[in-house]
Amino acid sequence: MRFAIALLVFVPVGGVFGLWPLPRSLQTGTTALKLAPDFDIHMNVLHAPSDLSDAVARTKSHLKNDKLGRVVVGRGSSDSSVIQHAKSLASLHVSLTKGATVRSITEEARLAIETRSEGYSLTIPSDGSAATLTANSTLGLYRGLTTFEQLWYQWSGNLYTIEAPVTITDAPAYPWRGFMLDTSRNFFSVSDIKRTLDAMTMVKMSQFHWHVSDSQSFPLEVPGYTELASKGAYDPSMIYSPSDVKDIVDYAGARGIDVVVEIDTPGHTSIISAAHPEHIACPIASPWSDFAAEPPSGQLRLASASTTNFTAGLLSAVAKMFPSTIMSTGGDEVNANCYEQDAETQADLKATGRTLEQALDVFTQHTHGAIIAEGKTPAVWEEMVLDHNITLSNETIVLVWISSANAAAVAEKNFRLVHGPSDYFYLDCGAGEWIGKDVGNSWCDPFKTWQKAYTFDPQANISESQAHLVLGGEQLLWAEQSGPENLDPIVWPRAATSAEVFWSGPGGDSNEALPRLHDIAFRMRQRGIQAIQLQPMWCALRPGLCNIDS
């Protein structure tokens, strides 16, 4: 087994802690402890990388600026007497275990996904003696700093906890804990993405799946293929330049997040026809529903050698822009009728003597070969494994999206998989139909509540012998009805749900989780992330009193 999936028993906690995700092993006491006015974090790491030093500085800034009162009636006023007499914690000592290799957080976050070390141990005595944080990697230290930040509340100028001593031994159940953002249907600025990364790192997410292009727009400026963005972006101001990409991936890496880019092929590529009509079959055909899953229609002419070479070159150029070891080539919702109606594709099939399925196989092997040559592991949507008879590398990662029930079939084919099922994790569901002249509901109704996502079992219907194939999962925002205006509230804190499922493991109690989810949402708002309210504040301040049986 490549990584641990066995769950540790949760130590019961009271209504104070706002830890999210819940540590795998947690022991707490009942003693008040406050941070000393001159509290400091001491790094005992030889040649500490700059992003670790920056992470420590951010933790100190968060401790100073979060200014979060406990999410209880009075916001902590009832704690004033115990705070007054509490001992003070003067320091947190941060160190790597003996013999650990010193790499930057960024380097650690970009290692092959099953080789990363994110575990840590955190001890906070109740007597005021120094707290300690140890890990085998700088990434583990960073995860521990994130936990440390969530332990403290403010009242009357004091930062304190009332549950010292604290002993935590923690590590994730799964390495892939992600969020996918679609920036094609509507554009999100670099600052929007960075703010999203800030929220992701608060809940120890590890993967930002960037669905950067689709049929509607191509906002990514790719060296050697700049015409795709210049003709395919909504506006010149709505383009991600190579420097924007570097800014985003560096920002993510320093926060323990790997950026996995997706260029969906051969479907969902209509917009490429704006620059290269010769490569696209059935562009903006009517009625669109005969040729695509949503408008506008248009797919890469996969039977064409010229188009295949063009696509391989494009993917290779994109791969060079992103340091992750993983890159997605999509592969979902390929429309056969589009190719059947396209004279050029039919001529190419006839000339080569191939069926459409055989042409897809050649196309995929060639384009995947291009990114493998750049050191990337391909990722694909589930149809490439379940609906098509094509040759894929055994290392290919498969993202399950249509239904949670399909994960078992992917595992049966012995592919590593990532859960992103629409019946649990699609954040856009339930907003009504966006197609004009249609008064129906969205295809994936109903709205996917945080409670629903919290019940997800990553190993459901997957045999014990195939359990190691599950890398984790992600929640996803398709942006047909989303933009910068509603990014934060539609995503947060709901997307934190899967972060806990895939860090702490499944089977958590939603009644116990709700006060902690309130807490992390309150803390997000303190940091400028507009997480939506989950209940009236009266309920948030009185855990359990708004339960149906209370």
Image: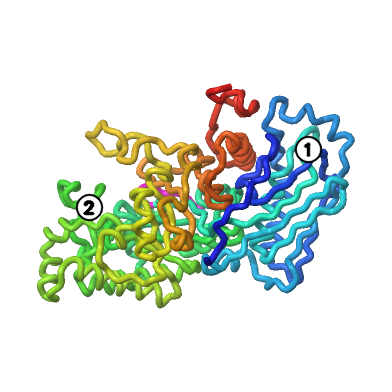
Q: Residue at x 87, y 46 (%)?
A: 127
Residue 194: horizontal and vertical position, in percent?
54, 52
Q: Amino acid at mark 2?
A: Ser
Write the start and end of the magenta stretch as one range: 184-190
Q: Which numbered dot is residue 102?
A: none
Sequence-first disc among 1 and 2:
1
- Secondary-structure class at tag 2: loop
Q: Residue at x 53, y 57 (%)?
A: 174
Mark 1 or 2: in front is: 1
Q: Which numbered dot is residue 162?
A: 1
Judge by depth and name the residue closer to the eye, 120 or 224: 120
Assess disc 1: are there few (<14), some (14-19) or many (≥20) residues with their C-alpha within 10 Å of its C-alpha. Answer: many
Quadrant location of residue 261? bottom left
- Secondary-structure class at tag 1: strand
Residue 105: horizontal and vertical position, in percent?
63, 64
Q: Residue at x 66, y 40 (%)?
A: 18
The residue under label 2 is 297
Task: Please tell me whether residue 127 belongs to the stretch shown in magenta.
Answer: no
Q: Amino acid at mark 1?
A: Ile
**How far separated are the C-alphas under marks 1 and 2?**
59 Å
Judge by depth and name the residue closer to the eye, 477 or 8: 8
Residue 382: horizontal and vertical position, in percent?
34, 58
Report the colour scheme: rainbow
